[in-house]
Image (cartoon, grey):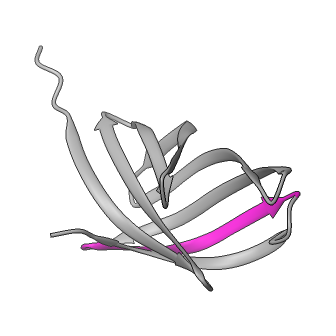
Amino acid sequence: MVLEEEQKSCQVARGERDYTLDVTQKFQEISRHVKLQDRESAISDGLLKGDQVTFWVRDEIAGQNVTMRFQGRIRGDRIDGSAEVTGGPFEGTHPWTAKRAR
């Protein structure tokens, strides 16, 4: 059996913060990293079930530890969902959208 890998890059906007999401998919698991300017944070516990995607990102923002749980629905070349942020200056639940980079 051959495992296929698929890589996608998406711009994720959150107000004034733009992220680049670089994803590798193996069956239902997703992994790789999120880039913000010159920093990278690993994606953890990434899961794809049907058209639903969930993953966690842990980072340091403004000197504070931050945990972000992203959930979304894939629709063609887009993902729409919410990000639950714990810690840091952006704490709360925020909408997010990702678009496939061309």
Q: Is residue 6 above or below residue 89?
A: above
Q: Which portion, as a residue range, is magenta?
A: 76-87
Q: Position of residue 62 (x, y in %)?
A: 81, 60
Q: Which residue is painted at 84% across and 52% down in the image?
A: 63
Q: Which residue is painted at 44% across and 46% down in the image?
A: 48
Left or right, 43 with reference to 93: left
Q: Position of residue 25 (x, y in %)?
A: 31, 39
Q: Which residue is painted at 15% across and 30% down in the image?
A: 4
Q: Which residue occupies the extreme top position in the image?
A: 1
Q: Nearer the viewer, residue 66 or 45?
A: 66
Left or right, 15 with reference to 92: left
Q: Is residue 2 above or below residue 31?
A: above
Considering the image in quadrants, where does the N terminus appear?
A: top left
Q: Which residue occupies the extreme bottom position in the image?
A: 15
Quarter occupied by residue 94: bottom right
Q: Is residue 72 above or below residue 78?
A: above
